[in-house]
Each structure stands twice: as C-alpha cells, then as structure tokens.
Image (spheres, grey):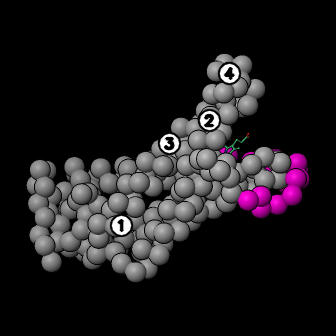
Amino acid sequence: MTDMTDATGETSAQGYPAVRKLLHWVVALCVILTLIGGLMLWKYGFMGLKDNFGIETTNFVYKYHKSFGLLILILMTVRIIAKLMMPDPPHVPPLSAFHRIASKSVHGLLYLLLLAQPVVGWVATSAGGFPAEFFGGAFPDLVGKDKALSEALYGVHGALGWLIILLVAIHIGAALLHRFVYKDGVMARMLP
Ligand code: HEM
C-alpha cells in the first residue's frame, strides 16, 4: 500500500487503479459535453436552434449530443466490467456509516442513470424516426416509428437529464468537501 500526500496536506492509503481513474475522467468529460448539447436542445428545441444558429449548427448539436451520449453508454459498460474486476480500494481511515451510505447511493444512482439515459435517448430517437448518430455512423434502430412512444420517452429523457445534473452537483460538492474541509484523502483516490 502506497501512502499519498498532496498539496492540501490530504493523505490517503490507496488510490483507484489507473484504468478506473482514466474511465472516470473520460466519462466526466463526455457527461459535460453531452449535457451542454442537451441543455441547448432543451433551451432552443429544433426550430429555435435552426432560426438562431442555422441548420448546419442544429444538425451538429443533435449529432454531437447523440454521439457523446452513446459513447457514455459504451464507456459505462466498460466501467462496470472494470469495477467488477478491480474493486474499490478500501478507505483509510474508514468512512463513517453516513458517508458510506451517502456515497454508495449517489454513485449507484449515477451508474444506473448514465446507463439508462443513453438507452432512453436512443429508443426515443428511433421511435421518432431519426438515426441514433454515432460520430461518422449510426447505431441501429431499436424500435419502429411510434410518435407517441417517442414523445413519452423524450419526457422521461428530460426528467432524467435534470436528475443527472442534480446528482453530478452533489457528487462534485461532496468531492470538494472531502478535499478542502475534511481533508481525508477521499478525492486524492481518484486524482492522477
Ligand atoms: C448520458 C447521456 C445523455 C444525457 C445526460 C442526455 C441529456 C439530455 C438533456 C438534458 C436533454 C434536454 C431534455 C429536454 O429538452 O427537456 C436531452 C435532449 C435530447 N437527447 Fe439526450 N442525453 C443523453 C444521451 C442521449 C442519446 C444517447 C441520444 C440519442 C441517441 C439522445 C438524444 C436526445 C435528443 C434527440 C434530444 C432532444 C429531445 C427533444 O427534441 O425533445 N440523448 N438530452
């Protein structure tokens, strides 16, 4: 077990394996990029985007939102396999029961939502009769055209989007609290 001390004086006995750290930060970047696109789609909608920014930018926003969203689905699948093969390092000193339950709940919900949200977006897109674009290509259609299903699922997609924003805010807030207030080495476990 290597002992780590960083600039803030935090100490931690053991960090996450390098592969899991890399997956964490790449997924974090993809979530930010996907949410920026999603929030533009929420604020403007198709017509608003087209009228304000032109059709090329509109198509780009849809394509890049779908592509990074589907990339999250792939990366989260890899992450779950990595988590099963390389379990979380133990906390030294151990977390209190409250912090252990709170962190397990937020992390579990984030894993679940980051898997469910791209699937809901993918099915909603297929049901709307549009391609699930993935950078240069597209994922296959999951269902046939069904306008009612598409609209219902976009409603779910919007609600899950806000839930993800809330959980990400709690997650970042907790990490900063551990780093700058508790100084207990929890955040250092996920840093390079
Ligand atoms: C973790 C991944 C994803 C997140 C966090 C996310 C988030 C969001 C958010 C916040 C919105 C705005 C919702 C609203 O208007 O109320 C949105 C819209 C949208 N998303 Fe996603 N999304 C993800 C993945 C995907 C995927 C994989 C697809 C399709 C393959 C997709 C397709 C769409 C489309 C087409 C819209 C516009 C919906 C409409 O016109 O009402 N999303 N997304």
Residue 76, image x, y percentages: 51, 64
| Residue at point 48%, 49% (across, down) | 30
Mark 4 touches mark 1? (CB < 8 Å): no
Cα–Cα gap, marks 3 and 2? 10 Å
Looking at this view, is 108 or 183 the one in front? 108
Looking at this view, is 95 or 124 the one in front? 124
In the image, farthest residue toward the front:
136
Which badge, 1 or 2, is on the more N-terminal residue? 1
Residue 126, image x, y percentages: 78, 53
| Residue at point 62%, 35% (across, down) | 61
Q: What amino acid does circle 3 point to?
A: Leu
Which badge, 3 or 1, is on the more N-terminal residue? 1
Cα–Cα gap, marks 3 and 1? 20 Å
Res. 33 mark: 3
In the image, farthest residue toward the top:
52
SS label for mark 4: loop
Which badge, 3 or 4, is on the more N-terminal residue? 3
Q: Assess mark 1: CB under 8 A from ligand 1?
A: no
Q: What amino acid does circle 2 point to?
A: Val
Residue numbers of the magenta segment: 140-158
Q: Is residue 149 magenta?
A: yes
Residue 6, image x, y percentages: 13, 55
In the depicted structure, whether residue 125 falls above or below residue 23: above
Cα–Cα gap, marks 4 and 1? 40 Å
Q: Mark 1 points at which residue?
A: 20
Q: Mark 4 points at which residue?
A: 54
Which badge, 4 or 2, is on the more N-terminal residue? 4
Q: Mark 2 points at which residue?
A: 61
User: How would you rate the neighbour count of disc 2 (Cα within 10 Å): few for under 14, some for 14-19, many for 20 or more?
Assistant: many
Residue 102, image x, y percentages: 42, 65
